[in-house]
Amino acid sequence: MNRQRMLWLAACSALLIASGLMSGCADNQAAPDASPSPGQAQSSPTAAGTRGEAPADSAAAGQDAASNYDSTAGGNSSAGESAADDAEVEQVLKSIDTGNGYHKKIELLKDGGKRVTITDPNGKATVRKVEYEGMISAVDGSSVTVQLEHGGEKTIEVGNHMIVDDETGQGFKAGTGIEWDVDQDGTILNIELDD
């Protein structure tokens, strides 16, 4: 009888842990993971080619330093308006219903980014970010200048505390492909370097 109870408790515990993990994965508003996942390394533009952890940088690092619409987190935008809302739309690339009342819209912005918005059945935005993609043209300390794929040039500040998925293993250098996402407050969410 005691053995059956132990098996039942183990199964219930496993189910509880699995449901907790699944609910955490589905939460789009969860805080970013502070530790790098496998295949990711922290990288700094000043230490191009090195991999590993670096000390935290200033609070200003991670902000989109030079945007064509001249707005950073809480900068020139009015209350309730976000950095993702400030950019002008050049064209709508895709607008589709994803099922269960959710809608996904991808817009090409005049500054070269792509704004991705996913709204729930009530019309509330559940995901709102701007994606940028291009080629690194210059690196100066923690400032990285990128020639964007859809035209224009953008300079971003990369802090030592930021996690960078570096598929090249060479760090930040001119000629390397780069992709990054910016949230609606203008904060860089993630950076990926690739060939």
Image (tube, grey):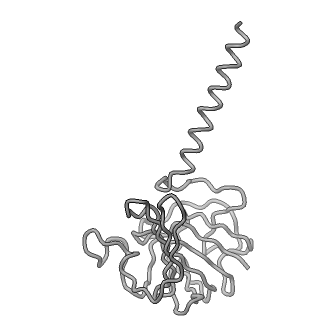
Question: Could you tell me which residue is drawn at 61 percent across and 89 percent down?
Answer: 137
Question: Could you tell me which residue is drawn at 54 percent across and 61 percent down?
Answer: 99
Q: Is residue 50 left or right of residue 64?
A: right
Q: Residue furthest top?
A: 1
Marker count (numbered): 0
Identify the image quadrant of the C terminus.
bottom right
Identify the image quadrant of the N terminus.
top right
What percent of the width, then of the height, locates residue 140? 56, 83
What percent of the width, then of the height, locates residue 19? 58, 38
Examine the rendered structure and indicate whether residue 80 appears above or below residue 7.
Answer: below
Quarter where residue 149 is shown:
bottom right
Question: Could you tell me which residue is drawn at 38 percent across and 62 percent down?
Answer: 124
What percent of the width, then of the height, locates residue 60? 42, 70
What percent of the width, then of the height, locates residue 103? 48, 67
Q: Residue furthest bottom?
A: 151
Residue nearest the observer in this picture, 100 or 147: 100
Examine the rendered structure and indicate whether residue 13 appears above or below residue 32.
Answer: above
